[in-house]
Amino acid sequence: MERRTPITSQATIQAYVVGIAPEVNGRVVDVPVSDNSRVKAGQVLFRIDPEQFEIAVREAESRLGRVGQEIGVSTANVDAAQARLVEANATLDNTREQANRSAELLKKGAVTAQRAELDATRLKEMQATVLAAEADLRRAREELGPAGNDNPQIQEALAALGRAQLDVIRSTVKAPSDGVVTNLQLSIGSFATAGKNAITFIDTQTLWITAAFKENSLENVAPGNKAEILFDALPGKLYPATVESVGLGVAQGSVDPETGLPKVSNENGWIRTPQSFPVRLILQGERPKGVRYGAQAHVVIYTGEHPVTNLVGQVWMNVLKYLTYLN
């Protein structure tokens, strides 16, 4: 019987229980939900005073404006340095031409050596001026950096503004999915800490049943097996379900957490009590109303076409569905 159509009374409704924690620190100014209230995905759970974050946004916007002005000044400096270099190169060309002319005329005796030497000196000075202008242009370009949004100063200012704007958004904490707020301990005036749970939230979009079966009854249990569930909270009706998975292990508890010493079982006798393993089941069809997280249930699994044991399981579950009225 247990190997073909296992039955257990050790089953409970399970759901994802989430600790909702803010991502920013601050004083709570609004809690528009109440304890054990149902909420929709995206519904506001609580708000943190956004003033400090809005101030940070304004500061970041101001910083971005200043960076733009600084880049404007740097751009003007580049333009000026480039103009000086163009002018210096033009003057250098004229000076070089004059120095070459003086050198040729000196060979012909048409100018004095002093004049030729003076023009050569001016050429060297102008060459130095061009080198200095080139250095000034390089320095101005380095200070300016890449153009547009590729400029590191712009990127840094935009990143700071983005962080500040994100903090404003994060000051309003919303429900991640449809669910229930429970064990609400948050009130206006409380100080919320980033990363610290402020609200307990039960996700009602994903519910399943975890049933404990003895290990010697799991031989034929496999994902896809049909099952029936009887909830203590809903006597008189059986609900169809399907096996989703079978647990592969349970905690052994073989070490004392305080001493670190191993625990040794003192069971005597020829037959030990079988270990129980969890089986996860999913309800078929619409979710029944009235079942809550942690609610208890009876479960029968039909592992195949076994007329006799399946009939026994069906009869037993039908007896239980009326007996639960007496609980």
Image (cartoon, rainbow, N blue to C red):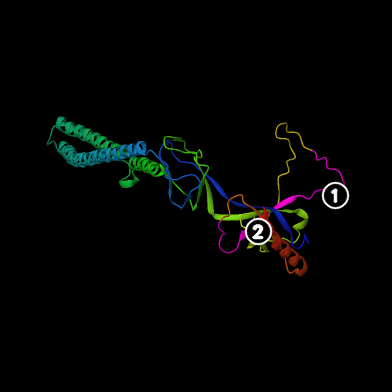
Residue farthest along the top direction in this orientation:
114
Residue 66 visible in the current orientation? yes
Amino acid type, mark 2: Leu
Q: Earlier in the sequence, mark 1 or mark 2?
A: 2
Q: Are marks 1 and 2 in contact (CB under 8 Å)?
A: no
Left or right, 61 with respect to 108, comes to right
Left or right, 311 with respect to 241, comes to right
Residue farthest along the left direction in this orientation:
110
Placement of the N terminus among the 4 image quadrants: bottom right
Mark 1–mark 2 distance (CA, rounded to whole Å) = 31 Å
Left or right, 140 with respect to 282, comes to left
Which disc is residue 131 wearing? none
- Is most of the magenta stretch helix, strand or loop? loop
Compared with 213, 305 (above or below) is below
What is the secondary structure assignment of the residue under circle 1? loop
Residue 247 visible in the current orientation? no
Residue farthest along the right direction in this orientation:
270
Query: Residue 266: x percent and y percent?
Result: 83, 40
Q: Which residue is mark 2?
A: 230
Quarter assignment of residue 302: bottom right
Amino acid type, mark 1: Ile
What is the number of callouts on the image? 2
Q: Which residue is mark 1?
A: 271
Range drawn in magenta: 264-289
What is the secondary structure assignment of the residue under circle 2? strand
Viewer-side residue, 293 vs 56 = 293
Query: Residue 196: x percent and y percent?
Result: 50, 38
Viewer-side residue, 142 vs 107 = 142
Mark 2 residue crowding within 10 angstroms, few (<14) / some (14–19) / many (20+): many
